[in-house]
Image: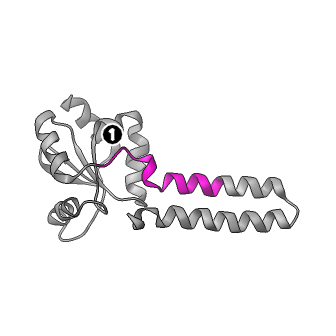
Amino acid sequence: MTRAWLLPTLLVLCGSFLATERALDGSPGAAAALLLVFVLLAGMNSPLIFPRSIGALEAQHRSAADGRPVVFWRPGCVYCLRLRMRLGRRARRLYWVDIWRDPAGAAAVRAVNDGNETVPTVFVSGRPHVNPDPRWVREQLSRSV
């Protein structure tokens, strides 16, 4: 879990340092704006922006029952963030598995990616799709429900 918060923590610390420098230079408005940008970046790269993760086995079991796709992801992944943002509210209908929290999820991703933990890897009807187009994922989700 520590890895998931490393990048957001570093972003907030760097932003705080830079904002403090700006404030000491006599630019409190610029300092506040700079800090806000870094806090937003930290939030976008934190696990908080993603729907609650479940274990790989539970996700696969639920997917088999209702046909919804399973997304294997990890915090800090730009492509995972892109997928999450483009799905919007629909993202909550998918099953999300954080491979840094779930060893079975990481193993499932490595099994289909030649030993690499390439994410996002989306399983639809048991078939893996690595870094799929968000429009395609939306279509698969609309077909499953």
Magenta stretch holds residue 2: no
User: Which percent across, then down, holds residue 40?
Assistant: 59, 51
Amino acid type, mark 1: Arg
Q: Which SS class for mark 1?
A: helix
Q: Which residue is mark 1?
A: 135
User: In the rendered view, how is the structure colored?
Assistant: one colour
Q: Nearer the viewer, residue 76 or 133?
A: 76
Residue at the (39%, 55%) spot, across then down:
79
Image quarter in which the C terminus is found: top left
User: Which percent across, then down, holds residue 116?
Assistant: 24, 70
Q: Nearer the viewer, residue 86 or 64?
A: 64
Residue at the (15%, 47%) spot, across then down:
60
User: Which percent across, then down, holds residue 37?
Assistant: 64, 54
Q: Quadrant of residue 1?
A: bottom left
In the picture, measured across the screen, residue 56 lies left or right of residue 79, that is left
Q: Which residues are magenta?
A: 37-53
